[in-house]
């Protein structure tokens, strides 16, 4: 027995030595670049006011487009035209479906594939009843306490207006890009982008147009969001999850509630929902999430560095840790969310049918079909049908863009030049962006905004008290100027 225990101890010591050795020999993968000289901005107060004025225009998009107000989108276009005269005098502007905007800045070398900067004009509504919870009025565009407040500051008028400021400044400086630059500002991203970005992308696809890279919203510079990493983490989205909502419909005999069967359709549906929630799709450490961990492992403190550096050996442990919080769990599996339930018309009548809608955000590697098959197996009840609720909104996960491309290096270089303390990591975007429609137009589709957010800030987008730092906004203008200079 002593010999066996001694041998086991040696094996454990050897295993520990391997784990520690692999962690100790990790080398940072961060690009080593000199910080760019800090660019002086002419009249930053005016820049902030132009941004604030854009926030004051309530360009709300609704699920029912008939509820949209065309006048506010016209007012937003007028504001851009008034604010950026050189841009409008030099770039070619196209209006798509009466609201989406495409600006084209011809490059010196038309043979080179162009690049695309994306943002969207529209914002989500304010949840009724929450207006009084805002520290500043939701569409005030107030500049107060070091922040610019209002719906759209984070998502994504800051990117839209800052991009225009960058182009205006470069034009004033006499800059002309080598590659053609396109600014694409959709009007309906918050409801899927089907009348805006999708139409624009289909036109270019039909023409056989290809782009060197596309940059949309998605990742940002996170502060204190990665355990074991003290530095700000610049998250570049290299892929985004897919999307499908499944409809579960339970059927049973109707009739009077005085003579009920053992289970009504609502009871049958409730049991089916419990089975679906109890059997989530399996977790997997792959793709963008694995690359995210690999990029950050050298920057981590012990013991996190040991665990992540040996992810191939300790994968079950890592998966359990990541599954322990909703945010990190969403990076390792297709998530399940029961979002709507309908059933019954009267308190004393048995419902013949009951329906639940279950939303899934699909991890790359899974698919709409594999999710459908998994849920049907989980339900396992012939009295419950499971179908795709709306085939028009179902979307497969995006392809993964490479991290060893010149385009990724360009973006990482610009981030490090303008934010020298940040470490850059590829990332999986959990929500959807208009860039999903551009997947056929470039191998290099990335998602990033140069704004700093702590974990508590993330709930502000689409929520109450949406805001961004005033200095952060001005620094984002510097970022886009540098990016376009580097691209040119």
Image (spheres, grey):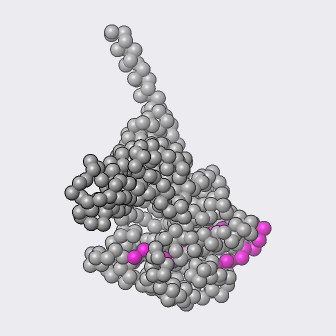
Residue found at x 61% / y 74%: 183
What residue do we see at 67% from left, 77% from top? 104
Q: Residue at x 60, y 54 (%)?
A: 399
- Residue 390 percent coordinates (x, y): 50, 62
Asked whether 119 falls inside the magenta stretch, the response is yes
Q: Nearer the viewer, residue 2 or 230?
A: 2
Q: Give left or right: position of 194 versus 5.
A: right
Residue 41, relative to residue 441: is it above or below? below
Residue 215 percent location from the top left of the image: 58, 65
Q: Residue at x 33, y 72 (%)?
A: 464
Compared across the picture, whether 78 is left or right of 454 comes to: right
Q: Percent x, y for residue 315?
A: 45, 37
Residue 268 in sight from this viewpoint: yes
Asked if the stretch drawn in magenta spans residue 213, the answer is no
**Residue 482 as seen in the image, left or right of residue 331:** right
Instruction: Say which of 231 and 96 sits in front.
Output: 96
Quadrant hosting residue 111: bottom right
Assign the C terminus to one quadrant of the image. bottom right
Number of dots carrying numbers: 0
Q: Is residue 281 visible in the rendered structure shown here?
A: no
Along the line of sight, which residue is nearer the eye, 14 or 81? 81
- Please state the extent of the stretch shown in magenta in the rendering: 103-125
């Amino acid at each position: 027995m002593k010999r066996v225990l001694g041998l086991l101890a040696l094996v454990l010591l050897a295993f520990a030595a391997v784990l520690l050795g692999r962690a100790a020999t990790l080398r940072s993968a961060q690009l080593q670049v000199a910080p760019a000289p800090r660019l002086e901005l002419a009249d930053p107060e005016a820049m902030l006011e132009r941004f604030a004025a854009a926030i004051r225009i309530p360009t709300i998009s609704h699920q029912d487009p008939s509820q949209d107000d065309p006048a506010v989108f016209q007012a937003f276009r007028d504001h851009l035209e008034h604010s950026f005269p050189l841009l409008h005098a030099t770039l070619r502007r196209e209006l798509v479906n009466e609201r989406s905007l495409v600006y084209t800045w011809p490059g010196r070398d038309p043979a080179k594939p162009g690049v695309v900067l994306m943002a969207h004009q529209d914002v989500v509504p304010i949840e009724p009843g929450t207006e009084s919870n805002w520290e500043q009025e939701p569409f005030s565009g107030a500049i107060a306490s070091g922040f610019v407040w209002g719906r759209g500051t984070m998502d994504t008028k800051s990117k839209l207006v800052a991009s225009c400021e960058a182009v205006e400044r470069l034009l004033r400086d006499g800059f002309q890009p080598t590659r053609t630059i396109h600014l694409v500002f959709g009007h309906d991203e918050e409801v899927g982008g089907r009348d805006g970005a999708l139409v624009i992308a289909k036109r270019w696809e039909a023409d056989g147009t290809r782009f060197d890279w596309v940059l949309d919203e998605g990742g940002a510079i996170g502060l204190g969001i990665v355990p074991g990493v003290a530095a700000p983490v610049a998250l570049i989205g290299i892929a985004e999850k897919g999307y499908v909502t499944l409809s579960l419909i339970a059927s049973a005999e109707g009739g009077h509630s005085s003579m009920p069967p053992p289970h009504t359709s609502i009871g049958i549906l409730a049991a089916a929902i419990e089975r679906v929630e109890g059997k989530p799709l399996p977790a997997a450490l792959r793709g963008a999430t694995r690359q995210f961990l690999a990029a950050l492992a050298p920057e981590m403190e012990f013991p996190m560095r040991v665990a992540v550096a040996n992810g191939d050996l300790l994968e079950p442990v890592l998966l359990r840790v990541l599954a322990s919080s909703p945010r990190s769990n969403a990076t390792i599996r297709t998530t399940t969310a029961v979002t709507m339930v309908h059933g019954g018309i009267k308190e004393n009548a048995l419902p013949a049918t009951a329906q639940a809608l279950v939303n899934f955000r699909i991890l790359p590697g899974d698919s709409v079909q594999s999710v459908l098959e998994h849920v049907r197996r989980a339900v396992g009840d012939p009295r419950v049908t499971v179908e795709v609720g709306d085939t028009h909104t179902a979307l497969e996960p995006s392809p993964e863009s490479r991290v060893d491309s010149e385009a990724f290096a360009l973006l990482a270089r610009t981030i490090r030049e303008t934010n020298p303390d940040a470490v850059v990591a590829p990332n999986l975007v959990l929500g959807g962006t208009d860039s999903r429609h551009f997947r056929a137009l470039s191998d290099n589709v990335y998602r990033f905004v140069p704004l700093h957010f702590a974990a508590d800030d993330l709930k502000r987008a689409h929520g109450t008290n949406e805001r961004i730092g005033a200095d952060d906004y001005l620094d984002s203008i510097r970022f886009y100027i540098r990016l376009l200079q580097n691209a040119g």
